[in-house]
Image (cartoon, rainbow, N blue to C red):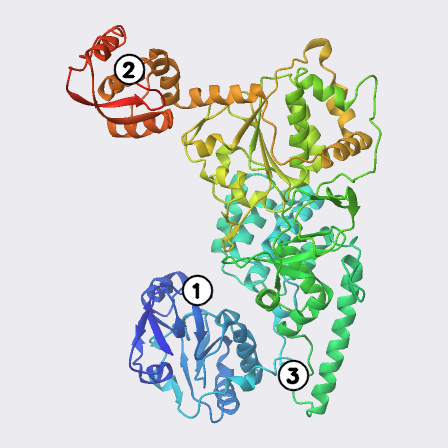
Amino acid sequence: MSIYVSKGFSKKMKIVEGVSPFQYLVEYLPEKVTLGEHATKESIEPIKRKASYFLAGELIGKRSNDNLLRKELIAIDYDELEDRDLKNFIKKIAESLKGISYILYPTIKNNVSDFGLRYRLVIDTDRSYTKEENDCLWQNIVNKIGMKADLASKTYSQIAGLPILNEFSSETLIVRQQANPLKVDEYLDVSEEQQTYKEEKAVRKELTKEVAIKMVEAYVENVGEKLLDRAYYLNPYMNIKYAFETGEIDFDTVQDCLTLLALGNSDWATHNIEHFKHDTSPVKNGTPFLDFFGWAYSDPYEEFEGIELGETQVLYSGKELKFALAERRKKELKKLKKSWEKSGGRGKPPTSLSTLRCGRILQEYIEFCLFDMEENTRLAMYQPKEGIYTQNETQIKRVIGWLEPKHNARAVNDVIFHIWKEAKIKPKTVSRYLIPVKNGVFNLKTKQLEPFTPNYVFTSKIATAYVENPSLPKFNDWDVESWLNEIACGDAQITTLLWQVISDAINGNYSRKKSIWLMGDGSNGKGTYQQLLYNLIGPQNIATLKINQFSERFKLALLVEKVAVIGDDVGAGIYIDDSSEFNSVVTNETILIEVKNRMPYSARMYVTVIQSTNEMPKIRNKSNGTYRRLLIVPFNASFEGAKDDWRIKEEYINRKEVLEYVLHKAVNMDFERFIVPDVSKKLLEEYKQENDPLVDFRETVFKPLGINKIPFYMVYSQYKEFCKENNFKPLSKIKFSKQFTYLLGDSWINKKIKYSVNEIEKIKALGDFFSYEEPPENGMPYQSLVRNDLKLIS
């Protein structure tokens, strides 16, 4: 193993060759700095940025938990020592680490101003250890020594400052003991048997950013304008600060929480955050975040019920799962205590379960899986009542907390890792014959509703239940069949397509690789048709995303575990510079999902993409790959005046019996591809012409020439004139040659060819078009566009 050093807090570290990590520390000559008697945190910070730091192990690339494959040496910081404790502290270290190699030295702030005594202990190890072993190893050493340590030094990839002496620290304060390295394996199995003090953070429930924000949102909703009183505001503020200081929440979460406390006033929010940044006084006797804010936040899993899996295993959920895990924890701790008593009862009895044991137990009660082996693929958990899988880490972490409430954030992540590495690979169920609805899985082949099962890997379902053979509901001479036919203006092809779009949209686990464009001006039924989809599928199962938003960072995360995506009111004629992500979602290609402050991961989406607009957007990518993904559905009806019946949108399409009828008809539709109505084909060709000046030139200028052979220079000259008249920027000659030849298709070729007198005369007859260009000369070869599917007669 190697030792890496850096200047300041850089993540790029330089490897030191030819010496073992511990020996490097023993031989290292301490740097010396002068801080001044009244140094502050702010005045010391620039010096820390220039100081030297180390990390020992096997590092690949920049420093991070993921890039540190294995670690060597154990660094522990002690920051809350008092003068009277120093001798006792050094004695405790010596007694606890008898026969073990270590170096103990003061850190940069030692004895400066009000910082008190600060020391760093670095212990040699007989082998390197992994990220999974880190927390247990570090904590057990701290427990053995028996004095409170700084939790930040527990971080796996945390760099530690090399020995540095200020004017209040002499070299005599450095203790170097060279004996035998600590045997790592002896300190990995005793984390639950040697806890000599309680680590405050470890006994609290795991708190993700999402849960913390929801708690504060609920708190703000309950207390409201009381927060306008500064004295009242300081109470939640101090507990947020306390949660940050004890490691319950990070700074990003702090900022969001303080913003919520500002009640929508951006100036107050900025002031709150700035005040926090400069507030250096530690909070004493604070209340844990969960205890202070948790009363306002309800548990979303209380109503879950368990289902049977096979003949013996039962998968629980909600209250039943929570109770089952709590009971199992009691039994497990009882066994551990018996084992501890048999081994002599040294130290305190075990009070928590190991992360590995938690992972194994949870797999007995819950079905976990991975959908694929892509980089950073996430763990999925089956929800019995819902009948679908979720990759939502907030939900998974909450369940882990039910089993072991004493685990902190890192421990919970370790539990997830242990489950992740043992989880089965179960690809998502992608089938047009299996459609998950509210009350089961409809099998299109058998026409039967099947119960949910973990063997079907779905991540979404619709909000409407399937009912066998419902009758067509009618209200005041209105019914959904007649209404859709009226929207389609009596065009049977459009009516069929409207039903097919509904059928495709209800299955979020299969896609026919088309984006649906609902196009038309107002008062045509378009908005009501969209509302029908929202009611049928459920608004919580639909992402709202317009084509121009697909390329925005973090936006694609909105599609996760959704059934469909609807972009309402796409700007008429807006320009789409990058449609690559949109195209990838439509055709179910792998996309990169980025969530703020999370590791990006790859995924495939099978959502139906629906966009609504008065006029199609301009798309930069004019390839056939773009056009083949578009299916335009015209809405040409008019429901103005007496025809504008508000009851349709506000009442009829919200009724349970209407939604059940629509679902029954849509779910029973069996088709491979969408029908493409004649009017939709015509609209697509018109759109190509509007979207692409090259297509427009072909349709309005080139085709009307009615000629089968023409020099390329004359065509290009005419193209430039066309662009000038229409304020288009012309393509270069090379690009025009390639793109226009491709656009003409296989019936035309671009090659050098000579012209006969008759052919030249035909070209001259087009003088009105080419009055500014000389015709070709007889017998001379010219690069030309030539019809390839006709026999040319000269």
Quarter of the image for residue 322 reads bottom right
Q: Which label sits on residue 193? A: 3
Residue indicated by mark 2: 793
* Residue 381 sits in quarter: bottom right
- What's the amino acid at mark 3? Glu
**How many residues crowd mark 1 within 10 Å: few (<14), some (14–19), many (20+)?**
some
Vertical arrangement, residue 41 with respect to residue 791, above or below: below
Identify the amino acid type marked 2: Ile
- The amino acid beneath tag 1 is Ser
Q: Position of residue 50 (x, y in %)?
A: 31, 66
Quadrant of the image for the C terminus? Answer: top left
Q: Nearer the viewer, residue 535 or 292?
A: 535
The nearer-to-camera label among 1 and 3 is 1
* Image quarter of the N terminus: bottom left
Q: Where is residue 162 in the image (x, y as percent from the top left)?
A: 36, 75
Q: In this view, does 451 lie to the left or right of 47?
A: right
Kindly report which numbered mark, 2 or 3, lies closer to the viewer in this rendering.
Answer: 2
Q: In which quarter of the image is residue 302?
A: bottom right
Q: Mark 1 points at which residue?
A: 64
Along the line of sight, the residue nearer the viewer: 767 or 300: 767
Mark 3: which secondary structure?
A: loop
* Residue at 62% in and 70% down: 202
**Can the viewer see residue 168?**
no
- The label nearer to you, 1 versus 2, is 2
Does residue 183 appear left or right of residue 525 in this picture? left
Say if mark 2 contacts mark 3, CB within 8 Å: no
Residue 313 x, y percent position in the rendering: 78, 66
Residue 545 shows in this picture: yes
Q: Earlier in the sequence, mark 1 or mark 3?
A: 1
Which of the two discs, 1 and 2, labels the residue nearer the N terminus? 1
Reading the chain from its start, which is encountered first: label 2 or label 3?
A: 3
